[in-house]
Image (spheres, rainbow, N blue to C red):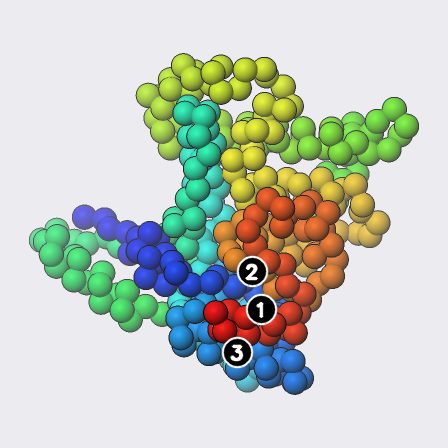
Amino acid sequence: MRRQIVDPKRVYAEHVFGRCSVYLDTNAWSDLSETRTDAARAAYDLALTAQSRGCAVFPLSYPTITELLKRDDNADSRRQTELMDTLSSGVSLRGGTHVRDIEVMCAFDFMTQGVTTTRRSEMFTIIPCYISDTSVEFPDGWTETEADGMLEKLLQNRPGLRFLQQQMRTATFLENHEVTDEKYVREISRKRNDALDWAVDGSGKLSATKLRLEEHTFVFRKYILGNLPRLVGPSGMQMIVRNIENIVRKPGPAALRSVVERMPSTWLSCEMNVHCTLSAKELTEKQDFYDHEHAALAVPYTDAFVTSDGGLLDLLRRVRASDRYDCRLLRGLPALSDFLEKLLST
């Protein structure tokens, strides 16, 4: 008998629903935990108050957890770990694969019913499942009641980020992420260079329209068509064939965009890629991957996004993220303090 350790909808109901979800990128977490300035100390106290009163939760994610685990295990990183455990209430956004599957189902709802669905309640999990949902195999002889009781104990005593820091930060972990980071830099650099051959307009400049169509075509082929058969089976695929002409009456870039727009994180990731390619003046760096993942995961599914990275905020404004998503973009800890003061006063 195999059972999932956690139900994301339960995590959402118990720890996120009714609270303001405030996402901090890695630099914001570092500044907050170090409390070296008056602004940092003020934000620190307000964040603890908001969390303890049940007004706010500060969820983690794959990029925040990974960047923390890549740091040396010392007094500063342990202090940050303890703060992250406290303010997050043990909550993380789900891994990218699961977010993608959920959003593919949102596209499926649109293609078969013409409706736009939101699945925010499925987007959160517990910290140990920040990469992938975890299951437990119970041996023969276990009853459903016994399995439920064991899972409940695991949830009540689940490990936090400090445990992951002690157990997962191994040489193999660091080496694997170094390979992943280098692959990202290599692939994005190649993609941007190749765009100069196929994505230019009549004047020789890069075309946002061509770049966007390439992004959306990739999503449709790789993510949607690549995963829907597994997610919905033959009967679901038949539903698309029967209904898609009624939803998307005129095939082409506009129809394709209308499907991808139903996938919030995916759409934002595409737009960020387009604008980064259009404005690329510097070489791609490893940190670009984490900056991208912070924003693409958090902005569509949380209430506030905190970063001191002016370039990242400028990119989010250029793609008009705040117009599409109900998420406040906050620059640095002073803006976080103002936001939390207003939250606590209401």
Which residue bears the numbered disc 2? Answer: 304
Is 227 located above or below residue 4 in the figure? above
Which residue bears the numbered disc 1? Answer: 339
Mark 1 or mark 2: whose residue is earlier in sequence: 2
| Residue 135 percent coordinates (x, y) | 30, 53
Measuring 64% from the left and 63% from the top, which residue is drawn there?
330
SS for dot 2: strand
How far separated are the C-alphas under marks 1 and 2?
9 Å
The answer to whether the residue labelled 1 contacts the one labelled 2, judged by CB atoms less than 8 Å apart, is yes
| Residue 341 percent coordinates (x, y) | 55, 74
Relative to residue 233, is residue 142 drawn left or right? left
The answer to whether the residue labelled 3 contacts the one labelled 2, judged by CB atoms less than 8 Å apart, is no
Is 16 located above or below residue 68 in the figure? above
Residue sitting nearer the eye, 64 or 285: 64
Residue sitting nearer the eye, 337 or 174: 337
Extreme residue in the right direction: 203
How far separated are the C-alphas under marks 3 and 2?
15 Å
SS for dot 3: helix
How far separated are the C-alphas under marks 1 and 3?
10 Å
Which residue bears the numbered disc 3? Answer: 46
Measuring 56% from the left and 33% from the top, which residue is drawn there?
260
Category of crowding for the residue at label 2, using alpha-carbon neighbours closer than 10 angstroms: few (below 14), some (14–19), many (at least 20)? many
Residue 83 visible in the snapshot: no
